Image (cartoon, rainbow, N blue to C red):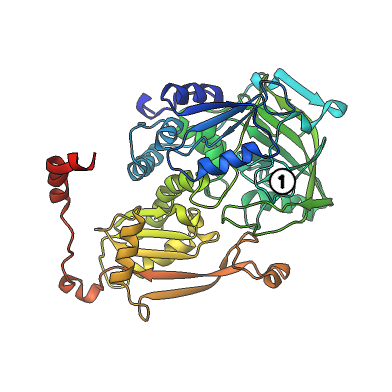
Amino acid sequence: MSDEWKVSYRDLRDWLEMVQEVGELKIVKGATWQEDIGMATEMLHQVEGSPAVLFDEISDYPAGYRVLVNALRSEKRLGITAGLPKDLNKLDLSMALSKKFKKCKPIPPQYVDNGPILENVHLDDEINLLEFPSPIWHEHDGGRYIGTGSYDITRDPDNGWVNLGTYRVMVHDEKHVGFYISPGKHGRMHRDKYFARKEPCPLAIVVGGDPLLFWAGCTELPYELCEYDWAGGVRGEPYKVIKGQITGLPIPVDAEIVLEGFAYYDDLKTEGPFGEWTGYYGSGFHQEPRVEIKAVYHRNNPIILACPPNCPPDEQAFFRAIIRSPLLKEQMETAGIPDVKAVWCHEVGGSRLLTAVAIKQRYPGHAMQAGHVASQCHIGAYCGRYVVVVDDDVDVSNLEELMWAMCTRSDPATSIDIIHRAWSTPLDPRISPEDKDKGRLWNSRAIIDATKPYDWKDDFPVVNIPSPERKKKTMEKFGYLLK
């Protein structure tokens, strides 16, 4: 890979230095873990382009035990994370990511013997998870969550495939955490295989580390593709890992904090409630597997990378929209859909509930074909709701343009297809409590054809908006009026 495609930082601390250099990092001292950090994070999440914030000297904790929030809430910081220019808007950044993904080839991790994560290793009676300032993120949460910007490392017991997945992690006590994984996720598949055999599931939880690897951990990558390999390809070099002393799982040597242990099929404890990415307490509290932590690794002055969900459009919705959109476009093209011009997984729907697809119509039924594939390929299948297909004269990332096209080019009686019993989640607020109790974790999808009707599209009324050339000329001549 050429140098222009490489990520230039080594770890989270290098990343923070780069973010500080471009003026997008603020440091707050003296905040409380009980309330202040959660309140500030919620506020930051609701403002696009708000800074990353590093909390230090947190109440009840020594200086140096830090929490980083809002890391990926700007195009500039996402550009740094992905090794792309820092001056791109969100749509251009998404398109640049699409081009980069097509150039990248997976690079497996490289095993080494030592690294910063081994600066502090706690075993047995030395383990105390309350050593770290895990916040309470939302006012109705059931406890402290150390894992929000984390990822869990698991291994398939059949073929050895290693997966990194972002699932919430709740602190139960000094030596135990709980973790929730929605059915159908890759980490859940691994865990279920161990539990079906009545065996403990080995687990390593990376609480703070490279933002790119976290980004990979909360993205729907293809089945059996390891996130280390994918992110290594994006980075342009292999991730360095060590073998965990307890599980043998690959642990990144530049991580900030890693918890290693086992989840047991017959050891359950109440987990939740937790405010989720839909903007609701969708799943309440349930009995979930408890993880016994057997080893804790951390660097000196460790940093918790935090990304708690809030009501969208929040930080998660923002960066997921930028990465999920090009991946969805790629999967649609792989499925054989021609002339997909743009895709946007809208932030207001948490990057899942509202998807927009722009196509250049080539044949009758093209729009509905594109919408159905977008709703059911791997990127789009989990907890979707609405897919709107438009012509390529519409900016799919612009919510107002999308709604204008839907309102003026679709007909409620003839332009909407409904898919029943699609893949959803207990976090879906629209599934009734009764259905959740019975495991009916599915929902419906609306595919809305908001393109000009194919059979008379050439006779469709001419739009009353300026051409791109006229818009450019207007800005050049009169743009000063907007300043």
Residue at figure coordinates x 38%, y 30% from the top left: 5
Q: Position of residue 213 (x, y in %)?
A: 55, 35
The answer to which of 9 and 283 lies nearer the viewer is 283
Residue 280 as seen in the image, left or right of residue 342: right
Relative to 108, say whether 299 is above or below: above
Q: Position of residue 312 (x, y in %)?
A: 51, 52
Residue at figure coordinates x 60%, y 24% from the top left: 254
Q: Quadrant of residue 75?
A: top left
Q: Is residue 244 visible?
A: yes
Relative to 315, say whether 68 is above or below: above
Residue at figure coordinates x 46%, y 63% from the top left: 375
Q: Is residue 226 visible?
A: no
Return the residue found at the far bottom: 413
The answer to which of 431 and 134 lies nearer the viewer is 134
Q: Position of residue 366 (x, y in %)?
A: 32, 68
Q: Which residue is mark 1?
A: 157
